[in-house]
Amino acid sequence: MKLRKQVDGCIASLVNMLVVCHAVMQNEAILALTLLAMESLNKSPVDDPDDFDCEESFISQLIKSEIGKHVAVLIDTNCAKMPIEVAENLLAFLDITSKKNDIALDYKNAKVHESLKKFNDARKDFSDDLKVCIGSVANVISNNC
């Protein structure tokens, strides 16, 4: 099935799910947003011949939904108790989306990079690879102009 357009409100609903109190729902929202990001941010005009700009729509909906603030709250409130699998999925989402300047700027304004650094320092159960990934994503966000 080919993704064509995101329905208005869909992205906002998923972003709001990031801050619910259940890790399973948070993880489902992260996975759904990651899949949407992978599909939306890798489109070329040849893939989507009508005039709809899937990438621009996805980015604007994320920013309108205050993705940066929601991610910062998710990390700050779940720092010590976030399951490793959820952390890995969140980092995959952040890695994909932080490559887009508009989204990275939203993350920077919400201080997601600072939350990630605190998260990295607080968790002794993370693998070295995961810690490197967290540091890398935090650097991409903090170095965004």
Image (spheres, rainbow, N blue to C red):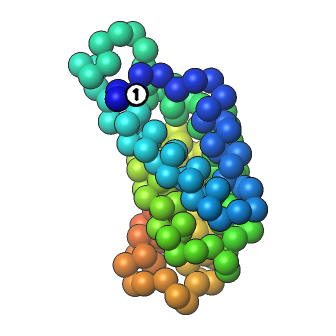
Q: Position of residue 27 (x, y in %)?
A: 57, 59
Q: Is residue 116 visible?
A: yes
Mark 1, Cα crowd under 10 Å, few <14 / some 14-19 / many 20+, is few
Up-down relation of residue 129 to residue 133 (above or below): below
What residue do we see at 43% from left, 44% from top? 35
Which one is nearer the viewer's eye here, 63 or 90?
Answer: 90
Q: Position of residue 123 (x, y in %)?
A: 58, 84
Up-down relation of residue 124 to residue 135 (above or below): below
Q: Which residue is mark 1?
A: 3
Q: Is residue 98 visible?
A: no
Up-down relation of residue 128 to residue 62 (above or below): below
What residue do we see at 57% from left, 29% from top? 60
Up-down relation of residue 27 to residue 129 (above or below): above
Which one is nearer the viewer's eye here, 88 or 69?
Answer: 88
Residue 115 quadrant: bottom right
What residue do we see at 35% from left, 27% from top? 2
Q: Position of residue 65 (x, y in %)?
A: 67, 37
The three-letter amino acid code for the residue at tag 1 is Leu
What residue do we see at 55% from left, 89% from top? 124
Q: Position of residue 36 (x, y in %)?
A: 46, 39
- Does dot 1 land on a helix, a strand or a loop? loop
Which quadrant does the N terminus fall into? Answer: top left
Residue at the far top: name it.
50
Compared across the picture, whether 70 is left or right of 128 comes to right
